[in-house]
Image (tube, rainbow, N blue to C red):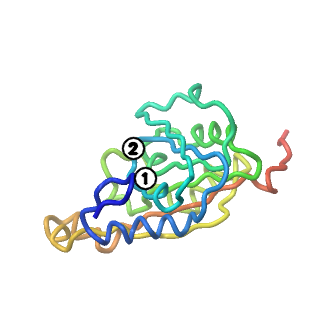
Amino acid sequence: MKHPGYCNISWRHDEWYFRQIAKFIGKLQGDCIDIGKINPKVEYLKYYNPGTKIEQIITEDLNFDMLTGHYDNILLFEVLEHLQNPLWCMYQLKQILKPQGSIWILMYARPRFMWNPEHYFEIPKKHLQKWILEPLDLQIERHKKVYPSHSLFYYFTGFKHFMRLFFNGMDIYQIKIKNNGTYKVKG
């Protein structure tokens, strides 16, 4: 199956998974930016939100000097777990977030034995809030667990693949600045 402006979807459950993400986010309004590698989920959001323009910063080495302007929506799909210092990244993103804007984060949060070797962290909700968001006066506005799926054959090609039947959830978050963008500087 191929959607206009969208990459091929090999299995119907891929579309089901992408639709879960798109429905959770809903209609994107205002200035939007996606940070990270090219991601088919972002392409699906464009399809799901016709007419919405999403600026993309496609990089493997994010240099925050590249970011200019302020945005209503910042998409950070499968990025934080690859960073040594996600707190610094979130601090930089807060600097370009409009006061009423949202940062949309999608990331794995699985048991340690299931982590991808390329991930520094897979951060559960309570640790994300306590260690990264609270020091920056950010908060989780909404959260949902979504489950990517694969063909049935995939789950029987190895032990880790089989365990993904039980431990493959991804968390999607809407992050906002506390107190609707009016916060006091701690001092």
Label 2 sits on a secondary structure element that is loop
Q: Quadrant of the N terminus?
A: bottom left
| Towards the viewer: 152 or 82 | 152
Label 2 CA crowd tier, 10 Å (few <14, some 14–19, many 20+): some
Percent from the top left, x then y, of residue 22?
50, 64
Horizontal and vertical percent for residue 174? 61, 60
Q: Residue at x 41, y 45 (%)?
A: 120
Residue at 21% from the left image edge and 70% from the top image edge: 151
Whole-angstrom CA distance, mark 1 to mark 2, is 8 Å
**Is residue 31 positioned above or below 152 on the image?**
above
For mark 1, give the secondary structure.
helix
The residue that mark 2 highlights is 38
* Residue type marked 2: Ile
Q: Residue at x 84, y 50 (%)?
A: 182
Q: Amino acid at mark 1?
A: Glu
Residue 41: % across, % down? 42, 56
Q: Nearer the viewer, residue 100 or 2?
A: 2
> How busy is the neighbourhood of tag 1: few (under 14 within 10 Å), some, or many (20 plus)?
some
Q: Residue at x 50, y 40 (%)?
A: 56
Is label 1 or label 2 in front? Answer: 1
Q: Which residue is mark 1?
A: 43
Up-down relation of residue 186 to residue 139 (above or below): above
Which one is in front, 186 or 150? 150
Quarter assignment of residue 185: top right
